[in-house]
């Protein structure tokens, strides 16, 4: 039995999931959905507020419920949040409902991309590089576990990466 016609982008914050996802979705004629943006839209609150009020556990519960709902659809390209792979059930949903592409980059590159972004609660600390390094160490094996395709985004233009993703998905390498 083949997987549904969905593409899921996983990877750390700052890897380019949203930017690359928008381009690849258009190329593949899929509906683009950003999981974090959809959570904010449905909650009527931004992610830092959800973290402040409900904590990370409350946010992760919302994330898991919405991921399961959206993944049940067909014809979407979903940019997940960086921590979506933490939950084993989320990993099963991703693996079973579409092609999973892991966008990876070094912690240093991620810091450069997220340095001025105040909407990332986990990075609002004195040493965000150490947080990114720790998160990558913890999550990289989980991203790899679910990935059908892995692409390095380090110092690559989003258009180039999106074209690579488009080509690989079209060639049914998932």
Image (spheres, rainbow, N blue to C red):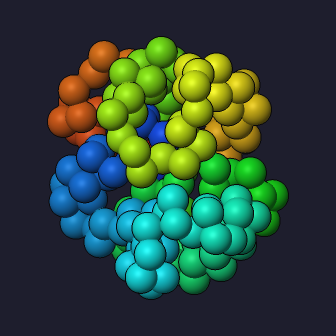
168 above or below 37? above
Residue 138, given in percent of the width and then of the height, sits at 76, 32
Residue under the point 57% across and 69% down: 50
Answer left or right for 77 relative to 22: right
Residue 112, given in percent of the width and then of the height, sits at 37, 21
Answer left or right for 92 relative to 166: right
Residue under the point 44% across and 24% down: 111
Residue 141, given in percent of the width and then of the height, sits at 74, 32
> Where's the N terminus, which quadrant?
bottom right
Foreground pick, 16 / 125: 125
Counting labels gives 0
Q: Is residue 68 visible in this depiction of the protein?
A: no
Q: Is residue 109 visible in this depiction of the protein?
A: yes
Give the farthest residue toward the right.
88
142 above or below 109? below
Residue 162, given in percent of the width and then of the height, sits at 27, 40
Residue under the point 33% across and 34% down: 116
Foreground pick, 1 / 98: 98
123 above or below 67? above
26 above or below 100? below
Q: Quadrant of residue 94?
A: bottom right
Foreground pick, 5 / 92: 92
Residue under the point 54% across and 48% down: 121
């Amino acid at each position: 039995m083949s997987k549904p016609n969905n593409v899921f982008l996983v990877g750390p914050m700052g890897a380019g999931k949203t930017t690359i996802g928008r381009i690849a979705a258009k190329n593949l004629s899929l509906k683009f959905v950003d999981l974090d943006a959809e959570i904010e839209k449905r909650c009527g609150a931004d992610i830092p507020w959800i973290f402040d009020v409900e904590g990370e556990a409350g946010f992760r519960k919302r994330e898991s419920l919405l991921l399961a709902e959206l993944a049940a659809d067909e014809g979407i390209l979903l940019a997940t949040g960086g921590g979506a792979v933490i939950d084993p059930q989320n990993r099963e949903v991703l693996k079973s409902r579409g092609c999973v592409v892991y966008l990876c980059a070094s912690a240093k590159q991620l810091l450069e991309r997220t340095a001025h972004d105040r909407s990332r609660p986990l990075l609002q600390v004195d040493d965000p590089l150490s947080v990114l390094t720790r998160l990558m160490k913890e999550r990289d094996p989980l991203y790899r576990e679910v990935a059908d395709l892995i692409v390095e985004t380090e110092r690559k233009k989003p258009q180039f990466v999106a074209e690579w993703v488009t080509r690989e998905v079209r060639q049914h390498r998932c």
